[in-house]
Image (cartoon, rainbow, N blue to C red):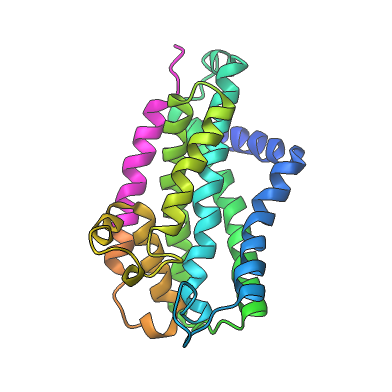
Amino acid sequence: MSRRRRIRAEATAAWHSFLRRRTAVFFTFFFPVLLVVIFGALVRTQPTGGGLFAEPPAYYIPGYLATVVLFTPLSRVGSEIARHRDDSRFEKLATTPLGRGEWLIAHTVVNVAIIGLASLLILGLVVALTGAVVPFTARLALLVPFVVCAVVLFCGFGAILGRLSSTQDGVIAASNTIAFPLLFLSDTFVPLELLPGWFAPLVEFSPLTYFARGVRTLTYEPAITDPYGTELAVVAVLAVAFFVAGAYAIPRTD
């Protein structure tokens, strides 16, 4: 069996496994939609009122997209590794030609498909429910590499968490502990000027910061003239680094 067929077979199995867990399907799409409804449609932004939601609705699109780009890979890949380890599935996989990197590629492809669909849903809801004005230009298509690179990055991160956590519950707890601070402290929902002066430089160490700034450049009118190449390059480099580290972290059974 060729490498492509091995990856396709594992990806197909992972996709059907995801669809069978209806609770996972529901919350993968429900959680970001809930954020859009609560903060975008119910609370609403106050562009002239100051405070946390003081920017126009389109300013917060990176934050809404970050919920699925961040939470879903961390929890899903980490949980899959913990589940495979608990059920001794890696010992069974060791008897097949499927390598650790191929396994992670297959599950990353599935996550890219899931998160791509969720991102389209979120973007449509933000425009429909909040009245956000998104500049529909040709470079809006660059959202695709931003989302793909970010998913690859956090799939690798999730694989590392799965290796370090001893149980599936431990993976969920660790992923939430990491994801929640990153979500709100990575130039997504909270503008830098609202953070203490001593903390603002620490935002630069979050990989999600570069995703948020790049996406904002593509979807927010006042920022559309800002450069985005640096942010995309940083996310891409980090994606490669975390993916390699994640593939290495997958339990070795040979």
| Left or right of 154, for residue 244 | left
Q: Residue at x 54, y 84 (%)?
A: 133
Question: Residue 32: percent from the left, percent from the top?
Answer: 62, 59
The quadrant in which the C terminus is found is top left
| Left or right of 5, for residue 18 | right
Q: Residue at x 60, y 77 (%)?
A: 44
Q: Residue at x 46, y 72 (%)?
A: 52
Asked if 109 appears above or below 214 in the picture, the reply is above
Instruction: In this rendered view, identify the residue nearer to me: 206 or 124.
Output: 206
Q: Residue 56: within the magenta?
A: no
Question: Residue 23: percent from the left, percent from the top?
Answer: 74, 42
| Left or right of 3, for residue 212 | left
Question: Residue 87: percent from the left, percent from the top?
Answer: 62, 16
Q: Which residues are magenta?
A: 234-254
Q: Residue 235: within the magenta?
A: yes
Q: Residue at x 46, y 66 (%)?
A: 189
The majority secondary structure of the magenta stretch comes to: helix
